[in-house]
Image (cartoon, rainbow, N blue to C red):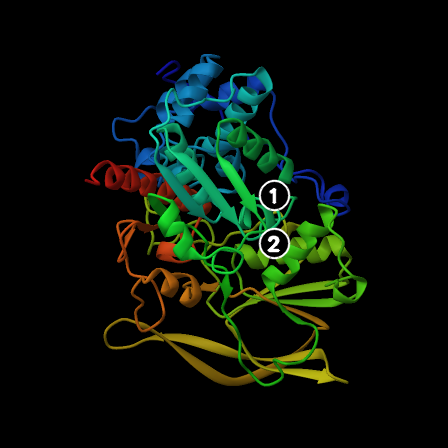
Amino acid sequence: MGNPKAFLTIKRKEAGYRPVNERIYDYGEVEQTLNEEDRQLQASRCMECGVAFCHWSCPLGNKQPEWQDALYKGKWKEAYKLLVATDDFPEFTGRVCPALCEKGCVLNKIGEPVTIRENEAAIIEKAFAEGYITPQMPKIRNGKKVAVIGSGPSGLACANRLNRKGYTVTVFEKDEKPGGLLRYGIPDFKLNKSVIDRRIKLMKEEGIIFKCSVEVGKQIKAAKLLNEYDAICIAIGSGVPRDLKVEGRNLKGIYFALDLLKQQNRVIAGCPIPEEDRISAKGKKVLVIGGGDTGSDCVGTSIRQGATEVTQIEIMPKPPVDYNPDTPWPYYPMILKTSSSHKEGCNRRWLLDTKRFIGENGIVKKVEVVEVEWEKDEAGHPQLKRTNRSEIIEADLVLLAMGFVHPVYEGLLEELGVKLDARKNVEVVDGKSSVDKVFAAGDSAFGASLVVKAIASGRKTASKIDEYVKNIK
């Protein structure tokens, strides 16, 4: 612990966001950066606790106290090596992770945790800038081949780990470029796509093969992969959105959140989108249904497209501000989260359920919502109760951001012979499916979750694949 009194004398300092009246006119990353001196001072605040709850809170098991100390002492290269020992892609987690580690930081007890996420991003960017990061080729190839289906965070992590172990890895991606929802689901104002391109370029230089615009089960048969590869990792994510089947759902102007987000990311990337297919919030009153991160991304995107008004509704109660006794430290606190997009101008409301969509000439114009209440039954389980209090919200663009259902794989996995349960979900235990050679990682294994959890799952699945292949007689 380089400075045992730093947490007492140095206040938490965040880089903050670019000014609202500047950032809403572009898709550049909203978050700013601190200079190196300030960043090292922030790292000095780490108390190097005997029981490091930041480490405990992190799905990757990052060793935050160790690399914080190295950063404080100006040993950037050492900090980088400690960081990437557990995290394959700090440039992603340093930007889009909700910082579970900071919620577990002891200093969060006084509301001033160490700026772990920002420090993490600073270390990896310094490493790229200073040339610490160069292609790391495996010393020898083991002659074994693995196919990874999907190039989101779990697929990339699995491919990266296996490549380092000497496997020849081929990643199959149905979209035109690698990255999965990192590229197509997260707005550029949170994660600039050049950051993904930089990492993919490095992975290619290290020997990983990427085959894009190839959907397994269509352009190439899954059974063919079973014959040609020693193992297969399914990492296709959980991109099936939850629908809202109420009166008027078939009206024009109602879209799933990812329809908007994917298209806007493609527009920024220069992909030609026919004008008649464009989803635009320009000059419209937008209603976002769903209060999570995806809904927040829709808010920010709609504002940048020129919406006249944006409202976001949520069926759940408004979370407590600052502290929730139901989720005490060091657990992740279920409290009100206000994103950079919310700060750009958004009317947020809670305890509202959608009753019906109202249209004119086949186009949505209004949405009737009803107030709800949550009560607990005798067993203590929350139960939804609809009231008779309803109202009309004007909206000529509606975005459904209510999360995702567990992925449905009938075509792909039935072709592989994987057993499906009643909901058409694959049976996966500890990364291994019910079929020989077939593994699953990330959201495709456990449902929609965080990028950091997907990376952790990809790493774990890579270890299971390595163990499996080595035990083949």
Image: 160 above or below 403: above
* Nearest to N terminus: mark 1 or mark 2: 1
Label 1 and label 2: CA atoms lie apart by: 9 Å
x and y, in percent, of residue 62 in the image: 36, 31
Percent from the top left, x then y, of residue 254? Answer: 65, 72
In this rendering, does residue 190 appear at all? yes
Residue 128, by quadrant, is top right
* Label 2 residue SS: helix
256 on left or right of 45: right
How packed is label 1: few (under 14 Cα within 10 Å), some, or many (20 or more)? Answer: some
- Name the residue rendered at 25%, 26% in the picture: 50
- Which residue type carries mark 2? Asp
At 26% from the left and 39% from the top, the residue drawn is 469
18 lies above or below 243? above
The residue that appears at 37% across and 26% down in the rendered structure is 141
Q: Residue at x 35, y 71 (%)?
A: 423
Residue 240 or residue 53, whichever sits in front:
240
Residue 204 position within the rendered picture, expressed as x and y whole percent measured from the top left: 53, 31
- Quadrant showing the C terminus: top left
Query: Foreground: 330 or 435?
Result: 435
Residue pointed to by mark 2? 297
Instruction: Name the quadrant of the N terminus.
Output: top left
Residue denoted by label 1: 190
- On screen, residue 118 versus residue 405, left or right, reads right
Mark 2 closeness class: few <14, some 14–19, many ≥20 residues within 10 Å: many
Labels 1 & 2 near each other (Cβ < 8 A) = yes
The three-letter amino acid code for the residue at tag 1 is Lys
From what the image shows, is residue 124 above or below residue 227? Answer: above
16 lies left or right of 108? right
Q: Which mark is residue 241?
A: none
| Coordinates of residue 197 in the picture (x, y in percent) | 61, 35
